[in-house]
Amino acid sequence: MSVLRLGVNVDHIATVRQARGTPYPDPVEAALLAAASGADSITIHLREDRRHIQDHDLARLTPVCPVPINLEMAVTPGMVDIGVAARPKYVCLVPERREERTTEGGLDVAGNLPAVREACRRLAEAGCTVALFIAADPAQLAAAKASGAPQLEIHTGHYADTDGAEQAAELARITAFAREAQVMGFEVHAGHGLNACNVGPIAAIPDIVELNIGHAIIARSLFIGLPAAIAEIRQAMTVARRAALG
Ligand code: PXP
């Protein structure tokens, strides 16, 4: 079976902690449990407003995480400084607006190429493998290539938020985009808004090799625990990928 990795995003463990300013629940403890429960990597998003993950979470997680860390960050010199100092194995550059509830839309690489290229250069020099989080918009591909980033993560938020014909059309766009990106030499990931019910068609796209999932896993873990929530989504991914490969 072609590989489909699962990155578990533990941001919302920190969201619950920050709601009360307590030391618990600890996203580092969640990351260790997620890794022990089969996560291939741990994703954290150090937002500029520090609404969930804090700098000390990154500092505490870095020496103890048994699987690669994927650090999501905005394309700003200050955030890139943090990435260069921490040297996580993976960095995913994302758009960020303070007023948004979550990461809305993809990075406009074409409109910000000099800044994106400079961030990619500095992070690659520090040994990080960089992904760009973008919508399935072929107009971004040439700029993404010019940025030097070796990986793309396709924003699946619109797919997750729609249904019926609109969702089918977005799935077709994502499938075609993943193919084109893979042919251009990118490693292709996807994520945002995925859950055990809607992940199947995305997991079935053979050009996608990694999914990053957070909110749905953490929400589900409230009722069945984190190991079971990870197993549940992994099972949905595996069943869909196997069926697609015949
Ligand atoms: N991938 C990226 C780049 C993201 O910014 C996020 C949200 O932080 C996710 C994946 C995970 O999205 P969700 O929490 O909806 O699963």
Image (cartoon, helix red, strand yellow):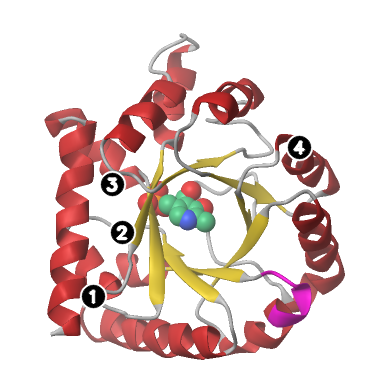
Please state if 49 lies on the left or on the right of 60 as rendered.
right
| Magenta span includes 86 | no
Tell me if mark 4 has few (under 14), some (14-19) or many (20+) residues whose alpha carbon lies within 10 angstroms of its own.
Answer: some
Q: Which residue is mark 2?
A: 194
- Give the SS element for disc 1: helix
Identify the main secondary structure in magenta: helix
Tell me if mark 1 has few (under 14), some (14-19) or many (20+) residues whose alpha carbon lies within 10 angstroms of its own.
Answer: some
Q: Quadrant of the C terminus?
A: bottom left
Please state if 197 lies on the left or on the right of 182 as rendered.
left
Labels 1 and 4: the sequence-earlier one: 4
Q: CA separation, marks 1 and 4?
A: 36 Å
Residue at coordinates 54% horizontally, 27% vertically from top-left?
Answer: 61
Q: Which residue is mark 3?
A: 216
Labels 3 and 1: the sequence-earlier one: 1
Q: Nearer the viewer, residue 134 or 150?
A: 150
- Give the SS element for disc 2: loop
User: Nearer the observer, disc 4 or disc 2?
Assistant: 4
Labels 3 and 2: the sequence-earlier one: 2
Residue type indicated by callout 1: Pro
Residue type indicated by callout 4: Ile
| Magenta span includes 147 | yes
Residue at coordinates 53% horizontally, 90% vertically from top-left?
Answer: 183
Q: Quadrant of residue 168?
A: bottom left
Q: Which residue is mark 1?
A: 201
Q: CA separation, marks 3 and 2?
A: 7 Å
Above or below residue 84? Residue 170 is below
